[in-house]
Image: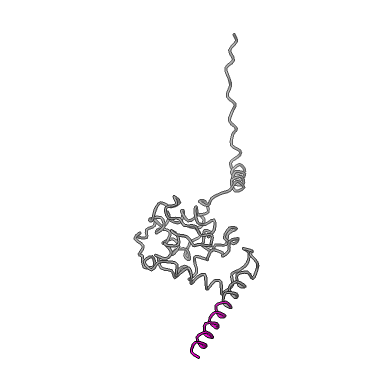
Amino acid sequence: METMKRGTLLIVIGLAVLGFGVAVAASMLHDGLSSRATPTKLETAIARSAHRLAIPASARVAQNPVLESPEDMRDARLHFADHCAICHGNDGSSHTMIGDGLYPRPPDLRLPETQNLTDGEIFWVIENGVRFTGMPAFANGGQHGGDQDSWKLVHFIRHLPHLTAEERAEMERYNPKGPDDRAEEQKENDFLNGPAPKAKPELKDHHVE
């Protein structure tokens, strides 16, 4: 009798796990495999829980060794503009052409979901990236100048909800520019300052033998 009860319990648990798996699969495939889809609340909750569990406990309690200063904040701001804004936007909203096209979309770094993370957790994400998303790992990848740059970025991410218009305007000058942007910039310069003078062809000496 006890064996039958145990067998029934295992069947019930198995069906529950199977049902949960089907629900997760249906949730993930609600719009096919399109990256334009918006993650459901179930997907978001699972991803957020898995993300937090993936961060080592030692990383969560790590303290930022870099003291905040105007110079370091500006370094981090311009670094963010050059390396991170292409996905996250200068203001951290992540509403960019690339950011809006990713699945899952990058988080709005100004909101509590990011701001409530510890300094150590934010640092860990910068250094290690997030698997199955567009967030790459930057540790030892030659993209950063070592731990110091990543810790400076932690300070800047904390500052994003208070970003000023002047700071954002400065960042725009450091955003990577494509060929179309450079051509447009050149047209504006030509209109304001006149076209750059063309270099004169070099005259070659002709010797009569």
The quadrant of the rendering that contains the C terminus is: top right
Say which residue appears at 52% left-offset and 57% top-offset: 85
Q: How is the image coloured?
A: one colour
Task: Return the x and y of residue 65 as percentages of the image width and height.
Answer: 34, 60
The residue under the point 56% across, 49% down is: 177
Residue 187 vertical position relative to residue 30 in the rendered view, above or below: above
Q: Give the vertical position of 160 relative to 189 (above or below).
A: below
Question: Image quarter for residue 40?
Answer: bottom right
Residue 95, how many percent across, how many down? 57, 62
Count all numbered tags in the image, as a single digit.
Answer: 0
Q: Residue at x 52, y 52 (%)?
A: 175
Majority secondary structure of the magenta segment? Answer: helix
* Residue 106 percent across, percent down from the top left: 54, 63
Q: As rendered, which of 78 and 198 lies closer to the eye?
A: 78
Percent of width and height locating residue 76: 43, 56
Q: Is residue 17 within the magenta segment?
A: yes
Front in this rendered view, residue 39 or 30 = 30
Depth check: give the residue in front, 19 or 75: 19
Is residue 168 highlighted in magenta?
no
Q: Which residues are magenta?
A: 1-18
> Residue at the spot x=41%, y=57% of the render?
150
